Image: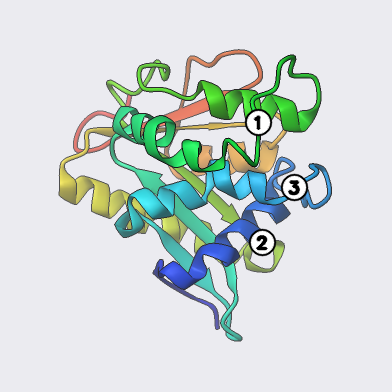
Amino acid sequence: MPQIRPYRPEDRDGLSEVCVKTADSGADATGMLPDDELWGLLFAVPYAEHAPELCWVVESEDGRVIGYIVATDDTDAFEQWFRDEWWPRFTDRFPKPVDAQTREEKLLDYAYGRAPGQQAHAGEYPAHLHIDLLPETQGEGFGRRLIETLFAELRRRGVPGLHLGMSPTNTGAGVFYDRIGMHRLPSGEGSVEYGIRFGGSDS
């Protein structure tokens, strides 16, 4: 039986693999980019590096990482760290695009543009998360259990709320977030955002 456990440093490659295999609106994005590792370097691994205590994995019976949740309890502080400390490690490997046209170039444009103060909901909902599960785990309740584990820790820390963004085409994720009690927030073009407040009215 798969189990949920805290993240360990040796799980890093497993995070990256799950991230790639779910990056295409929940489907496998392997081969969509010249370098598959870019997905994890943007959306999974930096969270585990920055706040490993807010990261849990689903481990299969044979020891593989088959799902995860990663988060920050302070979006603006995380984005400053990403800009100032994390992303500079990769700028030689991934040069800044001049005119972003391809999928990779648009992701790199996003990476180079990340900074504190850009997320409209970070004041009221300072935490944010990324959660991904391989198909073999879905429907077994692991998504809800990962979310409950994270939310309990954020409440313990006194974090007032959490937001997340997702692709509008990832309809399955939207159904899941509705089901666990999150509500939609005003969203920009090309994204759907959800939020939840802790310890008070969820509205």
The amino acid pointed to by label 1 is: Pro
Q: Which element type, helix, strand or loop, lies under badge 2?
A: loop
Q: Position of residue 75 (x, y in %)?
A: 34, 31
Q: Which element type, helix, strand or loop, lies under badge 1?
A: loop
- First in sequence, mark 2 or 3: give its number: 3
Is residue 103 visible in this depiction of the protein? yes
- First in sequence, mark 3 or 1: give its number: 3
The label nearer to you, 2 versus 1, is: 1
Give the residue number, with chain letter if any, for mark 3.
Answer: 35
Residue at figure coordinates x 74%, y 33% from the top left = 104
How far separated are the C-alphas under marks 3 and 1? 13 Å
Q: Position of residue 193 (x, y in %)?
A: 51, 26
How far separated are the C-alphas under marks 2 and 1? 31 Å
Q: Quadrant of the N terminus?
A: bottom right
How far separated are the C-alphas under marks 2 and 3? 20 Å
* Left or right of 20 on screen, residue 47: left
Camera-nearest residue between 16 and 128: 16
Q: Which element type, helix, strand or loop, lies under badge 3?
A: loop
The amino acid pointed to by label 2 is: Leu
Give the residue number, with chain letter if any, for mark 1.
Answer: 95
Q: Quadrant of the C terminus?
A: top left
The label nearer to you, 3 versus 1, is: 1
Q: Are marks 2 and 3 in contact (CB under 8 Å)?
A: no
- In the image, residue 64 sits, relative to residue 197, either above or below, namely below
Badge 3, how many Cα within 10 Å: few under 14, some, many 20+?
A: few
Camera-nearest residue between 107 and 63: 107
Q: How many marks?
A: 3
Badge 2, how many Cα within 10 Å: few under 14, some, many 20+?
A: some
The amino acid pointed to by label 3 is: Asp
Give the residue number, with chain letter if any, for mark 2.
Answer: 134
Residue at figure coordinates x 39%, y 57% from the top left = 55
